[in-house]
Image (cartoon, rainbow, N blue to C red):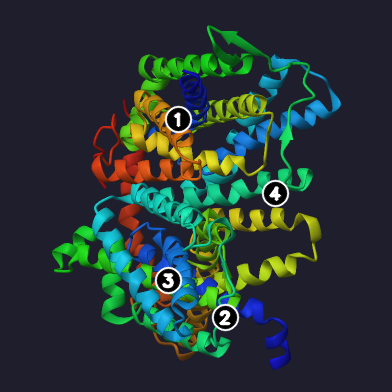
Amino acid sequence: MSDFFNANLVLVQSTLTGLLLALSIQVPLRMGVFSFAGAGSYGIGAYATGILVLRYEMDALPAIALTALGTAVIGLLLGALISRLGGLYLAMATVAFDLIISVIAINGGELTGASTGLFGIITDFTTGQMFVLTVAVLALVAMSEVGRLGRRVDTVRDDPELAASMGINVRRYRLAAFVVSGALGGLAGGMNVLVRSTVGPLDIGFGLIVLALTMIIVGGSRSWKGALIGAVIFTWLPDLLTVIGEWQELVYGVIVAVAAIFLPRGIYGVLQDGTRWVQRVRRDRRAAARGGPVVDADGGLRPQEDEAAVLVAQAAEQPVRELDQLSGRTQGAP
Amino acid sequence: MQDLVSVVTLGSVYLLFALGMSITWGTIDILNFAHGSVFMFSAFSASLVLERLTLGLVPVLLIGVVVGALMSVLIQVVAFEQIIKRARDRRTAEMQILIGGIGVAIIPLAIAQHHTQSNPFGLNASSFTVESISLGGLRITNIQVLTVLLALALWAAAAVWLRRSRQGLALRAIGVDAQTAALMGVDRRRLALVTMAVAGGMAGLSGVLFTFSLGAITPESGDTLLVKAFACIILGGVGSMLGVAFGAYLLAAAEVVILTQTNGSWVEAVSFGLIFLVLLVRPAGVFGRKEVRRT
């Protein structure tokens, strides 16, 4: 196990940062905020941590903490500025924000190292610390998906008007989405720069948005588990695809396209449907064996498939059929 | 004055490219992220044909238009129609289309990158040569003249088509309210295919023209243009024909000014900054009407 770990250390680290980056775009999406600002926060986070360590000789953990705090504040400001936009307009504004960050990185002169970026950012930051931080953050995100908070978040996304009428402050939730997204993105960027020891303008461009989005879409956009599946797949896939050789980019594109078109809820959605189906079949069988009523997935009762129940069901359907015939006749009439 | 020539030609390229995106976004609600890929791959296909045949200007332009239109229709049928069929509501469809477009765009890019090893490719094998003409102290190439004329002509044609023809009326009706339009007998699927073909054809045309005027482009250049086209569309207002022209030439002017006044590394920030500013001050764009959404 530890051999495997050491041999693939880079990939393990990339999985962790990829996961946080994916979460930084997934959390706002889950609240119905179509924001890609997480990628920009990643860029800010990477540079900020690099600068704090290099120029101010800070230790790893305080530098990361300061960075995450800073990107959270930037997220709040950005959110306050653009949260009134909706849908694709908001998305474009955040894409613009991300790209401005990379242009600033190129033009930052001494401070950001211009087009070569920052390098030699060496601290005592370990993969173990990285793992602990990621798991802690993941736990916090997972907590927002269950219970009261989870239901509120779902309502804010699916029906903001309903949420508002239930006394949920929708605007505050949307702002929170920006703040969390900023902190997660900053954390991901900061940790990545500490384990890689370099960052350049090319690392934080448009490709970052595409990467994070593909992780979420292929993995699943409604749960942290989906982000985890996506992060694992897209960190390890390029490595596995080297077997295919020169056409790996093409295969990558096909996978993303197929997932986006045919699996709108991602791999996690498919798994969820699969386990639910298996559970239902099992429960039905057990219930049938006991001879009791079958409980539906939504908790409703379904009639047993015995003779009496079939008769009742037929009787219930009868008037509907008559109505159908009736409407068929009226449709035919001039 | 020479700068003005640059502004007009650059703006025309942006206009030609952004026009198709603006039409599809404003009417059939498809923000096509694969538009840049179509642009690049049309020029790339033309360069592949030129490796075997020597052709003049018109056939090369036709190749670009045909390849672009076919690709767009293919993407519409294979990707976007499937997404719309499966999506629960309009908002998820919008998002899914955006992401599907990103995914689809990787495929032509990968093919072109594989074939060229990410090196720039050009259309120099054509029998058409770019010549520079002098007009009262201004240097201007024949391809620049052609780009400007074609961009303006197609823009005017598209505007008239949308405003005057029955198809245009139907398209605008879809843009306002797809469901009611369908009830009035508008065949949404067929119109969407026509629109995508027109948009793709324009992307292909601009790809070939842009490659001719620059000499060579890299497979990645479609992505850069994509972001700039967003800037043009958002500046002017989604779906507004006047707006997209205004956006294209304003963006070109701003970029040329920055390019001549500074060392040039801030040029990229102009389009993003403009997007951001306009969205803040006038979210519907300069010529856009306020979007009314009833869901």
Q: Is residue A222 visible?
A: no
- Sequence-wise, the earlier of marks 3 and 2 is 2
Q: Residue, x 50% and y 17% (percent of image)?
A: B154
Q: Is residue A165 visible?
A: yes
Q: Which mark is residue A186?
A: 3
**Where residue A261 appears, x then y in whole percent?**
55, 53
- Is residue B246 or residue B42 the one in the foreground? B246
Q: Quadrant of residue A287?
A: bottom left
Q: Secondary structure at mark 2?
A: loop
Q: Nearer the viewer, mark 4 or mark 3?
A: 3
Q: Is residue A158 left or right of residue B43?
A: left
Q: Nearer the viewer, mark 2 or mark 1?
A: 2
Q: Which mark is residue B110?
A: 4
Give the crowd class for mark 4: few <14, some 14-19, many >=20 residues within 10 Å.
many
Give the crowd class for mark 3: few <14, some 14-19, many >=20 residues within 10 Å.
many
Kind of residue indicated by mark 1: Ala
Q: Which residue is mark 2?
A: A122
Kind of residue indicated by mark 4: Ala
Q: Which residue is mark 1?
A: B252
Give the alpha-carbon distance from disc 2 to disc 1, as whole Å.
Answer: 43 Å
